Image: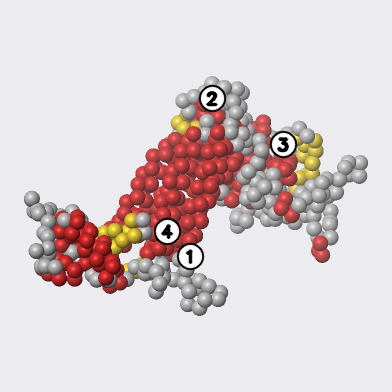
């Protein structure tokens, strides 16, 4: 809990009156979703586990009345959502930027409604101050709804409305739940619908979050570039189909990884531009019902000011309210990067395999003992972790794809699972990238002599001799080297096809790892 927030009262709810049915028992999963001290209706735990009378407030909604913990900033609709959606155990507060984005949207709406004369100064000021506190990191523990929920995000929107309303009531000198003074729907949600608030908040959340991802990816690219320079003189064998191919430098190998991952930084910066287009003012289905004609432009203007982000109104609010295309594209970019990262980590694990019975070309930093039974074993745990994150991101992308397709008519009710998977992918991948850079790439060392010995003993160097010996000669020598265990160099010298000086030049690291100008009309030599 934030140090500035009030400590919730450990008392909770008194039992329902005898004339009313007792509330259904709550699972431990449901209890764990509430802030400390905020127990569901009718339950509180005293010393030794005994149930004791609780401090509550009575709230009502469409379905009836319920007792809500007096210590809770959320209200009856949030309480119902906590009881209904015991799904992931991951609540809204798990994504702080989403909670902040929701508060920014609500503040912008209050400011726009005040400018239009729809909301009086006192209520607007209280709502804005409550939102500012949430933006500053307070009261997040009261955002207790599961991220996956039915209702297309209504529970998320109402969780925000109720927390903001009850905090605003306190700021105005009233008690929590005194909604006749300031109401979650009538005032905090004025001129809004879940169907424009929720997607706009998710888009803003991504705009507030993505730079941590691009920064982490940039730092990883820096480490890879540094290694490409450090290892620029380390000659080794390149491989195709896991078989020896032609020589390459270890620096070139790291440089290739740097180039492929750096592309994704620009891809991310391009795709987030889609999220600058929001549908605030669309309300229920994009027609703008219950809003002033000037509201949409004003609320987006205020949201730009509150968030510090450049935002524009969607060109077609009906399309923007139902279409999830931006999230599909964004998830696809994360998946593309995850696949690349996983491939790089596969390569790192192969190149460091051994240390005695594998490729053993590089050494990864030793992070922890690798076995409970095999002494001395150290595993490539950081690349393994990144592989697993990649699999999760790929699976999340499939979910986003299916959920985006599953929308019907004027709304996609699957937005919560889209939001959860996109935000989880962004969060997981950012952390995995930073860990890979700091705990793996920066500490890699090369086994230089071992790499060179592998090149000298490889049949693959015959490719470099192909222009000078001809394909048929080169094939014959390669076959002979494999069958007799001889080196290519020794066979060429013994047959007098090239001098030692010529071989040194052709087989130099520089000439084998980059293009070189050959003599015109160069004729392959043959055995005399």
For residue 283, side relative to residue 272 (left or right): right
What element does badge 3 sit on?
Answer: loop
Residue under numbered circle 2: 318
Which of pointers 3 and 4 lies earlier in the amino acid sequence?
A: 3
Residue under numbered circle 3: 179
What element does badge 2 sit on?
Answer: helix
Q: Quadrant of residue 113?
A: top right
Numbered mark located on residue 346 in the image:
4
| Dots 3, 4 in contact, CB < 8 A | no
Q: Quadrant of the N terminus?
A: bottom right
Numbered mark located on residue 381 in the image:
1
Marks 2/4: CA–CA distance:
45 Å
Q: Nearer the viewer, mark 1 or mark 2?
A: 1
Q: Nearer the viewer, mark 4 or mark 1?
A: 4
Which of pointers 1 and 2 lies earlier in the amino acid sequence?
A: 2
| Dots 1, 2 in contact, CB < 8 A | no
User: Which residue is pictured at 69% across the width and 35% down the height?
Assistant: 183
Marks 1/2: CA–CA distance:
48 Å
Is residue 107 something that shows in the picture? Answer: no
For residue 86, side relative to residue 58 (left or right): left
Q: Position of residue 451 (x, y in %)?
A: 29, 68
User: Which residue is pictured at 84% across the width and 60% down the height?
Assistant: 50
Mark 2 neighbour density, 10 Å: few (under 14) some (14–19) many (20 or more): some
What element does badge 4 sit on?
Answer: helix
Which of pointers 2 and 4 lies earlier in the amino acid sequence?
A: 2
Mark 4 neighbour density, 10 Å: few (under 14) some (14–19) many (20 or more): some
Numbered mark located on residue 245 in the image:
none
Q: Position of residue 151 (x, y in %)?
A: 66, 35
Q: Nearer the viewer, mark 2 or mark 3?
A: 2
Q: Position of residue 231 (x, y in %)?
A: 28, 64
User: Which residue is pictured at 73% across the width and 45% down the height?
Assistant: 83
């Amino acid at each position: 809990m934030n140090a500035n927030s009030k400590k919730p009262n450990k008392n909770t709810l008194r039992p329902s009156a005898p004339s009313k049915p007792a509330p259904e028992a709550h699972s431990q999963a449901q209890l764990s979703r509430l802030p400390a001290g905020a127990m569901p209706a009718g339950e509180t735990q005293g010393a030794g586990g005994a149930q004791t009378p609780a401090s509550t407030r009575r709230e009502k909604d469409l379905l009836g009345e319920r007792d809500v913990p007096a210590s809770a900033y959320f209200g009856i609709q949030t309480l119902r959502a906590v009881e209904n959606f015991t799904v992931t155990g991951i609540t809204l507060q798990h994504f702080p930027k989403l909670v902040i984005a929701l508060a920014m949207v609500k503040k912008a709406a209050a400011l726009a409604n005040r400018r239009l004369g729809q909301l009086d100064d006192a209520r607007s000021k209280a709502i804005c101050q409550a939102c500012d506190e949430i933006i500053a990191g307070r009261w997040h523990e009261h955002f207790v709804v599961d991220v996956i929920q039915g209702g297309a995000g209504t529970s998320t929107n109402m969780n925000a409305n109720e927390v903001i309303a009850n905090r605003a009531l306190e700021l105005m000198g009233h008690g929590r739940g005194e909604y006749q003074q300031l109401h979650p729907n009538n005032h905090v949600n004025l001129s809004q619908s879940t169907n424009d608030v929720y997607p706009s908040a998710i888009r803003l959340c991504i705009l507030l979050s993505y730079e941590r991802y691009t920064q982490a990816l940039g730092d990883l690219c820096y480490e890879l570039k540094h290694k490409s320079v450090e290892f620029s003189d380390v000659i080794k064998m390149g491989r195709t189909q896991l078989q020896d191919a032609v020589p390459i430098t270890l620096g070139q190998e790291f440089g290739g990884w740097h180039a492929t991952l750096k592309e994704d930084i620009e891809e991310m910066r391009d795709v987030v531009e889609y999220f600058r287009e929001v549908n605030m003012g669309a309300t229920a289905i994009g027609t703008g019902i219950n809003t002033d004609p000037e509201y949409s432009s004003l609320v987006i203007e205020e949201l730009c000011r509150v968030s510090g982000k450049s935002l524009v109104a969607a060109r077609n609010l009906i399309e923007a309210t139902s279409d999830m295309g931006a999230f599909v594209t964004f998830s696809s970019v994360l998946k593309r990067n995850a696949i690349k990262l996983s491939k790089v980590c596969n390569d790192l694990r192969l190149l460091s395999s051994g240390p005695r019975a594998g490729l053993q070309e590089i050494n990864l930093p030793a992070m922890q003992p690798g076995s409970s039974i095999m002494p001395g074993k150290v595993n490539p745990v950081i690349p393994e972790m990144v592989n697993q994150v990649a699999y999760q991101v790929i699976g999340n992308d499939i979910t986003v794809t299916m959920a985006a397709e599953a929308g019907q008519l004027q709304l996609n009710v699957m937005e919560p699972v889209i939001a959860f998977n996109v935000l989880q992918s962004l969060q997981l991948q950012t952390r995995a990238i930073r860990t890979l850079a700091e705990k793996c790439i920066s500490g890699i060392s090369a086994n230089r002599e071992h790499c060179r010995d592998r090149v000298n003993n490889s049949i693959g160097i015959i490719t470099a001799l192909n222009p000078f010996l001809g394909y048929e000669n080169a094939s014959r020598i390669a076959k002979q080297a494999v069958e007799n265990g001889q080196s290519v160099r020794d066979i060429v010298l013994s047959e007098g096809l090239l001098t030692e000086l010529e071989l040194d030049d052709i087989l130099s690291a520089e000439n084998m790892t980059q293009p070189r100008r050959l003599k015109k009309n160069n004729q392959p030599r043959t055995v005399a």
